[in-house]
Amino acid sequence: MRIARGVQNKVLESYLEMNITSNEESWIVYFSIELNAPIIEFETLFINDNDDGILDPGETADIYVSFKNNGGASAYNTFCEITETDPYVTLNSAIYELGTFTSGSIMTAMYNISIAGNAQIGYIANVFAEINADMNYSNTSMFILQIGFAYTNEGFETGDFTNLDWVMGGSADWTISTDAVEGIYCAKSGNITLKKGIFIKDNNFWKWVGAIKMNTIKRETVVIQLLDESAKPIMTWKVGQSFAKLPSKSIKRILIQEMNSINLTKKTT
């Protein structure tokens, strides 16, 4: 019996027939054979630009493309070649050798690419990845490269929250502000009030309060941590441009303002 190369994962739909003959009698045996083959498909993409993990116009970066072998057999001498025909993307490297790709495993290929300086923010480029291995195995997947942050040019530039289906939460209302890092508008949370206890030899809070003179407030970055039972942080938030406020003559509260992002998410369907 001969098995064709390049067969996909499946169980043969028809039975095989085997004739067995002896001097006394003959038999006919029916059976099926499960044929396993690799099925290597795109899994995830990671961008290493030594900055924010976002491909910007004029930037050169390494991209790490991960694939998973969802088939029932390993692939040998595996390599992946990426191709594109996009005017804004240049592939500085295109072929990566993966070697033996075992069933159920995930392997990652690394490539270097450059983005044209005149590429538009939010532009989407399609890249094709062709996987080849021994026994004539071949499969092609596609992934996308997004230039810039997806919502940089479609978020708050309308001056309100109507352009995207935002869901707001928390106790502080969100507003539109012109204090934007990019563009004209940005989202700004309402005032967030935190209580702070005073501990022995904890002088940082007093130094901060002492910086308030003649209505001049020194703004700092406040780090908020959620601790587990062993006092190890399991979540950390940073609040920028924060200041201490004396509500009366009692120093019991810290008023946190201008928090850039807290509990503001885009609704997904």
Image (cartoon, rainbow, N blue to C red):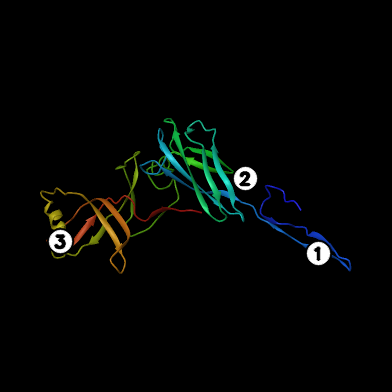
Find residue 269 and report its horizontal and vertical position in percent: 51, 54
Query: How far is disc 3 from disc 2 in space, using C-alphas?
Result: 66 Å
Residue at left 67%, top 51%? 8
Residue 110: image location, x then y, percent: 47, 42
Q: Is residue 167 left or right of residue 18?
A: left
**Within 10 Å of the Cα at label 3, are there few (<14), some (14-19), or many (20+) other Cα atoms?**
few
Question: Label 1: how many residues lie within 10 Å, few (<14), some (14-19) or many (20+)?
Answer: few
Q: Secondary structure at mark 1?
A: strand
Question: Viewer-nearest of labels 3 and 2?
Answer: 2
Disc 3 from disc 1: Cα separation: 85 Å
Element at label 3: loop
Badge 2: how crowded within 10 Å, few (<14), some, or many (20+)?
some
Numbered label tally? 3
Q: Residue furthest front?
A: 23
- Disc ID at residue 202: 3
Mark 2: secondary structure: loop
Nearest to the observer: residue 135 or residue 240: 135
Q: Would you name the residue on which mark 1 appears?
A: 29
Q: Nearer the viewer, mark 3 or mark 1?
A: 1
Disc 2 marks a residue whose amino acid type is Asp
Cα–Cα gap, marks 1 and 2? 33 Å
Tell me which corner region of the image, top left, top right, bottom left or bottom right, holds residue 128: top right
Q: The residue under label 3 is which amino acid type? A: Asp
